[in-house]
Image (cartoon, rainbow, N blue to C red):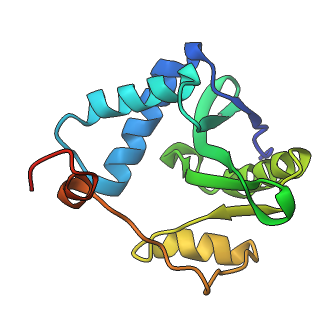
Amino acid sequence: MARPEFEFRFAKPQDHAALADLMLEANRHYWGDVENAKEMTSRAAEALVSGRTGCQAVLACEAGLLKGFATVCVLLPAVNEHGTFFMKDLFVSERARGTGLGNLFMRHLARHAVELGCHRFDWTAETDNPRAVAFYDDLKAERVAEKVYFRFSDANLRAFAGTGKD
């Protein structure tokens, strides 16, 4: 059986519906059925395809059908005055897993980072997602032990910002 041919490109406004559907699949994969998930993923896809955020969506397509997406941005300033290429999410549809798409996607993103003059390509993985951690380990990516990941969320974010109750 021939290996699938994938095309990688940045999302455009006409990709909104397909990206929203794949983001909904990702949402269900990670968190199950969540209230308002369809509306949330549609708004997120709209923000990504409109270009009004600092992130871009990179799409992986096979025969014109969306099979995966990654959300990326360049962080500045960074080491040696070059940007750090940062990937927030990488998701491959269930129907495309096992095809090598994840590896090809990461190599495409790495080439793009190099083309942009970035000296680093960073991302995170959830500790409770052993398949993702194993995937990145298999790529021979370096683990960054000297970093600590911090977060404000929900009520703590609003309280710290001084913008809401809680």
Residue 159 placement (x, y as % from top left)? 19, 56
Seen in the picture, residue 98 relative to 63 is either above or below; the reply is below
Residue 154 placement (x, y as % from top left)? 22, 54
State the quadrant of the C terminus. bottom left
* Residue located farthest toward the front when viewing the structure as drawn: 162
Give the residue at x 62% y 57%: 98
Residue 21 placement (x, y as % from top left)? 42, 30
Inspect this view and state whether residue 100 appears: no
Instruction: Please give left or right for residue 63 compared with residue 92 in the image.
Output: right
Question: Along the line of sight, which residue is nearer the eye, 46 or 14?
Answer: 46
Question: Along the line of sight, which residue is nearer the eye, 162 or 103?
Answer: 162
Instruction: Please give left or right for residue 16 compared with residue 3 in the image.
Output: left
Residue 16 placement (x, y as % from top left)? 50, 20
Instruction: Answer with the quarter of the image where residue 150 lies.
Output: bottom left
Q: How many marks?
A: 0
Give the residue at x 75% y 35%: 8
Question: Along the line of sight, which residue is nearer the eye, 40 or 81?
Answer: 81
Give the residue at x 48% y 73%: 149
Give the residue at x 39% y 75%: 128
Inspect this view and state whether residue 141 appears: yes
Instruction: Answer with the quarter of the image where residue 25 lies.
Output: top left
Seen in the picture, residue 156 relative to 150 is either above or below; the reply is above
Instruction: Answer with the quarter of the image where residue 153 lies.
Output: bottom left
